[in-house]
Amino acid sequence: MRLTKFLQIRQWHRLPRFRPSHPILQRSPPPPSGQAASRPYRSIVSYARQLSLRQAKQLHAHIVHSSLTPDNFLASKLINFYSKSNHLSEEHNLFDKILERNIFSWNAMLIGYSIHDMHGHTLNLFSSLLSFYSVTLKPDNFTITCVLKVLSVLFPDSILAKEVHCFVLRHGFDSDIFVVNALITYRSRCDDLGLARILFDRMHDRDIVSWNSMIAGYSQCGFYEDCKSLYRKMLDSTRLRPKGVTLVSVLQACAQSNDLVFVKEVHQFIIEGKIEMDVSAHNSLIGLYAKCGSLDHA
């Protein structure tokens, strides 16, 4: 089943399908420019680059008061602020008032839904975006990364993962590091560790998220020796240094394999590298020493 067809037939938690109040293809007047540019518009474009939450609300009020149509740049800025401050109704209302949206404004809404774990809304909106697909409006790498995150949570299914992978290949996103990282996580969630590792090995450039995704995949799926082996490879072959989230995955692998030597090695790295670990991670480390019979170290 094609990804687009899948999105069309799903009823995301019985949510009403997103319907913008203004036609997406209706041409809105371009922002004023040159001598015709209004002082309010020029000032708010400059002002939008450095905003606090309070200033964002003031800017929105100024736009409404000045009867200006919010363009994609201004709207995306405000949508991001409303999302971070948990004002989702204002976020949606602002998006709805943009007469001609570009991919930046769509992404702002998608990311807003995603970071609040509103997965059904995210896929619903993405489905609407695909219905408006054109030469000038089509998903980019940020769009696909956002959607992959949602799918990995809601539908860890190998068949769907294959369709998503094909979608990525057809649209030329297979060389984008953010998309491939998300695809590795998705494949891992579907227990397709072999395909996830192929994606990882074929990457020309890897960042810390690439390593974290693959290491976490091995740990979560029970491939503990592979997890520890890849951790050592990361230390030996890259300048990247594991973060707290990486070490949590490695420690989980150590717990399942009762590998006291490896636990001590990771613990020493945490101390020498001054790695920040939260309380739960420290508790896990104590539990690991106890499980391995090393109560003195615990």
Image (tube, rainbow, N blue to C red):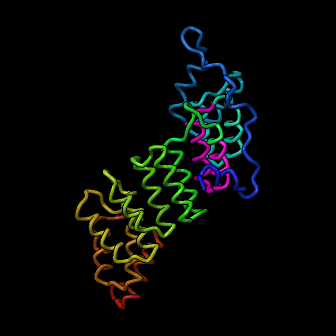
Check residue 278 for magenta coloring: no
Q: Specify the farthest residue to the left.
A: 236
Q: Residue 69: which quarter of the image?
A: top right
Residue displayed at 46% across by 49% down: 169
Going by the image, does 125 lie left or right of 267?
right
Going by the image, does 107 lie left or right of 125?
left
Q: Specify the farthest residue to the top.
A: 35
Residue nearer the viewer, 246 or 228:
228
Q: Residue 58: which quarter of the image?
A: top right
Residue displayed at 74% across by 40% down: 19
Residue 1 percent across, percent down from the top left: 60, 56
Q: Which residues are magenta?
A: 101-128
Residue displayed at 61% across by 27% down: 71
Q: Residue 233: which quarter of the image?
A: bottom left
Check residue 125 for magenta coloring: yes
Residue nearer the viewer, 63 or 222:
222
Residue 242 percent across, percent down from the top left: 33, 63
Query: As displayed, is residue 222 above or below residue 92?
Result: below
Question: Is residue 84 something one can see in this rendering?
Answer: no
Residue displayed at 57% across by 47% down: 111
- By secondary structure, the bulk of the magenta-drawn segment is best described as helix
Query: As displayed, is residue 77 above or below residue 178?
Result: above
Quadrant (top left/top right/bottom left/bottom right) for the C terminus: bottom left
